[in-house]
């Protein structure tokens, strides 16, 4: 049996009780509010309560951006592998690949900006 990756996005738990969902997660706006309030990639607030609230929010954003960057990097890797092994009509066009690079760069800039203490 293989274990999932250790980063937080894969460690998020799912509520199995569909009849009684967590109230703030049962609506789109509730989910959006929690994300904006600084939850991490696992859907939970930053675990280190000894940090100031602003720092916890910044670290949650860094974690979400890092997980996003990992996802974009995996997509770029798959696109490159497909480009080298498939016919041109089967791989992503250059505009899509360039967009993925810009997304990765933007996420990296967020990580670099928010990782440093203020």
Image (cartoon, rainbow, N blue to C red):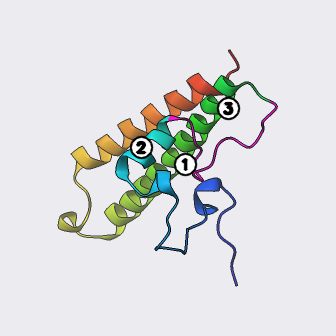
N-term mark: 3 or 1: 3
How far across and down, in percent of the image, does residue 117 sit? 70, 19
Closer to the camera, 2 or 32? 32
Q: Main secondary structure of the magenta part?
A: loop
Q: CA distance from mark 3 to mark 1?
A: 17 Å
Q: Would residue 71 appear left or right of 1 to someone viewing this image?
A: left
Q: Is residue 38 magenta?
A: yes
Closer to the camera, 18 or 82? 18
Q: Residue, x 49% and y 42% (percent of image)?
A: 35
Eyeballing the image, is 57 above or below 94? above
Q: Residue, x 65% and y 27% (percent of image)?
A: 115
N-term mark: 3 or 2: 2
Quadrant for the N terminus in the image = bottom right
Quadrant for the C terminus in the image = top right
Q: Residue furthest top?
A: 118
Residue count near mark 1 (Cα–Cα under 10 Å), binned few <14, some 14–19, many ≥20? many
N-term mark: 1 or 2: 2
Using the image, tell me which numbered label, if any, was put on residue 67: 1
Please identify, in this view, whether the residue under mark 1 or under mark 2 is nearer the observer: 2
Q: CA distance from mark 3 to mark 2?
A: 18 Å
How far across and down, in percent of the image, does residue 80 sit? 39, 57
Give the residue pinned by disc 3.
56
The region drawn magenta spans 37-50
Using the image, tell me which numbered label, if any, was put on residue 32: 2
Q: How many marks?
A: 3
How far across and down, in percent of the image, does residue 46 sit? 68, 41
Please identify, in this view, whether the residue under mark 3 or under mark 1 is nearer the observer: 3
Which structural element holds mark 2? helix
Residue count near mark 2 (Cα–Cα under 10 Å), binned few <14, some 14–19, many ≥20? few
């Amino acid at each position: 049996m293989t274990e999932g990756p250790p980063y937080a996005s894969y460690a998020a738990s799912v509520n199995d009780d569909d009849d009684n969902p967590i109230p703030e997660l049962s609506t789109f706006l509730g989910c959006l509010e929690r994300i904006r309030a600084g939850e991490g990639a696992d859907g939970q607030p930053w675990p280190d309560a000894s940090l100031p609230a602003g720092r916890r929010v910044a670290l949650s954003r860094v974690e979400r951006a890092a997980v996003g960057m990992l996802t974009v990097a995996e997509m770029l890797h798959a696109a490159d592998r497909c480009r080298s092994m498939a016919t041109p009509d089967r791989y992503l066009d250059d505009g899509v690949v360039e967009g993925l690079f810009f997304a990765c760069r933007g996420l990296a800039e967020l990580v670099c900006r928010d990782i440093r203490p203020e």
